[in-house]
Amino acid sequence: MASSSSSSPRIWRYRVFTSFHGPDVRKTFLSHLRKQFGCNGISMFDDQEIERSHTIAPALRQAIRESRISIVVLTKNYVSSSWCLDELLEILKCKEEIGQIVMTIFYGIDPSHVRKQTGDFGKVFKETCRGKTEEEKQRWSQALTDVGNIAGEHFLNWDKESEMIEKIATDVSNKLNITISGDFEDMVGIEKHLDKMQSLLHSDEDGAMIVGICGPSGIGKTTIARALHTRLSSGFQLSCFMENLRGSCNSGLDEYGLKLCLQELLLSKIFNQNGMRIYHLGALPERLCDQKVLIILDDVDNLQQLEALADETNWFGDGSRIIVTTEDQELLEQHGISNIYHVDLPTEKEARKIFCRYAFRQSLAPYGYENLAERATELCGNLPFGLRVMGSMLRGKKEDDWESILCRLENSNIPKIDAVLRIGYDNLHETDQILFHLIAVFFNYDNDGHVKTMLADSGLDVRLGLKTLAYKSLIKISTEGEIVMHKLLQQVGRQAIQRQEPWKRQILIDTDDIRDVLENDSGSRSLMGISLDISTIKDDMDISARVFKSMRTLRFLRVYNTRSDTNVRVHLPEDMEFPPRLKLLHWEVYPRKFLPRTFCPEHLVELHLEDTQLEQLWEGTQPLTSLKKMVLDSCLYLKELPDLANATNLEILDLSRCKNLVEIHSSVGNLHRLQSLEMVFCKKLQVVPTLFNLTSLESLVIMGSYQMRELPDISTTIRELAIPETMLEEFLESTRLWSHFQCLWIFGCAITHQFLSHPSKRNLMLVRSVTGIERIPDCIKCLHGLKELYIVGCAKLASLPELPRSLTTLTVYKCPSLETLEPFPFGSRIEDLSFLDCFRLGRKARRLITQQSSGVCLPGRNVPAEFHHRAIGNFVAICSNAYRFKICAVISPKQVMVEDQDIELLCHILINGCPMKSPLKNKYDLAITIQSEHLFIFPSTLLTVDRRPEQYSEILFEFSTTSQDIEVIECGVQILRNKTDIRSSYGSCESNSEQLLELEDDLDYDAPRVDTIKDFPNFYTLATVIRKYTWEKTCQLNDHMFRHRVHLYESWLVGRTRHHQKEMKSIKRSLH
């Protein structure tokens, strides 16, 4: 249906249109029906003044098209009138094209006679068909078959006509109440969800189908289901929304009684008859097996509910769709439902828009509230329900009140949000709740394998527990194994811990509770973890020397600092001992120079000591076989690394910003499971052992280590490398056998920390090379497996050699001397090509870059000449029958410089006034600084658009950016030639007026489609659209064609508002 793809509801002039044979019912049944409709406030089209003829009048055709519901009253002599039959054709056409609801009344006629054109009805039909063409007879016959298959009211089934009329009026009222409305029109992102759901529903398939919608509480499952019901219900004989089924199995009934009760409720709703009673479980399939139904089962939480209401698809007629919303994926799988839509969180931009709609009743935050709105959105973690509740709560409040409320909500949820999110948590088994607490406090965003290792001796069934939490949508586990818990669910877990009795708590997170335990040695013997934010400590904390000795079950100790300006208020005694079986030791700003002498890391899996006073970790060798991750970031006073010979399972070693570290212990060269090694800003580092034997090493980062003269020997298995430009030539000489190598970063002068993989908020340092390279050696083309190349801040780099054919991403940033580059090799597959702030690129180099078919970014103030359709501003329109284009936009900072922003360019496309469902995107993810104008160029294809190859279309491209500090100042389109695109410019349209007129052959239908352009950014009236098209006149727009379009739209505007007519006159004046 056309309505399914429209982003805006139609405006209906009439509620109901009736198609009938006048002599049969006009003065009897129809007059009573019209009176009842009047009592119910239902407007019905009156055809009294339309003169009947052999063909359907244009006014009648228009009335059908402008009615929300058409009722076909089928009588014996209905088919005696070709007028009636043509009306029926138009009604069914509207049903398909614009989603019109069609209802039937079989008044003294058997529905089977209508479907098959038999009996007296068939005889009358044959008489009418006499002298007609075969094509006309076939169309009428098919229309009667189709309308006969629509379930309706059968006159012979009623004892009293008055009761039937009341029932019809009630049904019409109900259908009008659920027809497509503006309820979901402004709902951010709803179209994206509906499109994905409709692809799962397979509307074109005949069989019945059950589809699941799964996701955590508050993500919008019910909203999506309601929107689907609103949009799709008119295409089904019966529909029903069974809301809030959660907890229905706790009614106290036995299983059989419960299922009977649920079936009674469904049948009562779907047939709109309160209090229906059934006495066996076969009643529901018996009643619905031959009906095409749409049923929404919302918030299902028990398998019995599905067994009662949708146990088998053959319970329902062909084409039926059952949609189940739930938080529990396992429940869907147990019922054999494989078509499942997992609802994702909205994007950051969508989340801000949702919040602003509720907080400010507009899409953007007003001046002065931008940062507050961003904080509020971040607190909600983009969860739609949280955004709606918080936005409504903050609406109308002053800035000071916002600040106070947001500060209070940093560590607690709004009760209304908490109540919704707690439902899934409260239904967990006690052991799963413990796992939920541990993930909320310690393991969010960790790998599932790491969590299993950490909890191996906890007594928890971690594998099953993770599976349960994932099935119930309380966590998500990515394909790479990363565990993600939503931040609002994290708050649910933390608050659940705080609600426990103190003696029951296995995890401590409250500062006062932790102070009491650490100072007074009063910890529980069942304590598993402590997580302390030292920035919340108000007075000095003196930790007891023996406090940890009694905590034999303590496995996880995390002391962190959320504010870098906090003075350390934790004091440790010299003879303090750590717990004996500690697995996680994470202590930021550790206050002593040495770890305790008795420190034994035998069971330690992760050691994270950041920004500490440590000068030495330990002496000699230690049992480190369990250690997998060691982070010593910003240990500024650490002078040497201990012997790590026993750390045979170590995978990650981070020594970044250890500026006094001189030498890396030789034992590191034998860590055969080491995967990542980072040595960033180790200013005094001179000696690094050979890394040739590290066969597991995939990532090596060496930046800012100015006293390192040579690149260490590296294993041939390396995949990613970041080095200063001074080591480049030596690196290239060593890489001939590197078959796994994929990503290379080359850093030069004056590059800030944003480009490092683990930037520190407290160290805004620069990478400064000793010398600058002027060219990259030619042998780089021999890196046949290289996919990504990043060249950053090489100030003297003047040229680029031939690059490997395997390259897919090339980013060159802040290389101001770069002028030339060699042609890209034949068959190269570069997808992203960026030359940001490379202002000296020569003409030949720019030509090579812009000719690529991939996404391109480079400095520039004007759209290149090969883009024949150009316009000042952020939109351009063309007329073409082509499918393939290149599009270009010039972006410019509104200020002198826009710093550290991700840039995303969007291109919205309208074809003949109808927007495409999703905009094209070109995104640059790195935090970059834009100093002047840049070009963004990327390909576009319209292959998904349903057009005849020879048909010309009016295509409008409009560009926008996600940054408020960047604007699009110019844009252009280049038509890519193909077999069907022989003529591409407006000028060439003049000789093809037939194709042009074909686009406008039905103004009554096309004009409203153009009117939907109000949903497109910056276009609010049709006149405004036409006014914007006048810009094309200065871009070789054919004057004759433009005047023709104005004339067509002027015809459509006849009878519209005076405002529109004035707009049209001003446009016509602008042509002279």
Image (cartoon, helix red, strand yellow):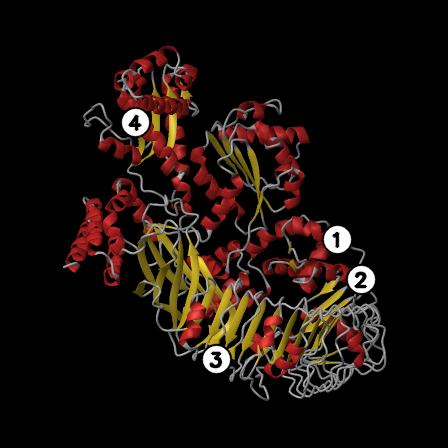
Counting residues from the start of the chain, the first of labels 1 and 4 encountered is 4
> Residue 76, image x and y in percent?
33, 14
| Residue annotated with mark 1 | 463
The residue sitting at 42% across, 42% down in the picture is: 4
Distance from disc 4 to disc 3, alpha carbons, whole Å, reads 71 Å
Which residue is label 3 attached to?
Answer: 818
Q: Could you tell me the amino acid type at mark 3?
A: Leu
Q: Height in image: 169 above or below 380? A: above
Task: Measure the alpha-carbon separation of dots 4 and 2.
Answer: 79 Å
Query: Around disc 3, counting alpha carbons within 10 Å, would you say few (fewer than 14), some (14 to 19), or many (20 or more)?
Result: many
Residue 526 numbered tag: 2
Amino acid bearing label 1: Arg
The answer to whether the residue labelled 4 contacts the one labelled 2, judged by CB atoms less than 8 Å apart, is no
Answer whether labels 2 and 1 touch (C-beta < 8 Å): no
Which mark is nearer the camera, 3 or 1? 3
Q: Are marks 2 and 3 in contact (CB under 8 Å)?
A: no
Residue kind at label 2, given as amino acid type: Ser
Considering only order in the chain, which callout, 2 or 4, is on the residue closer to the N terminus?
Answer: 4
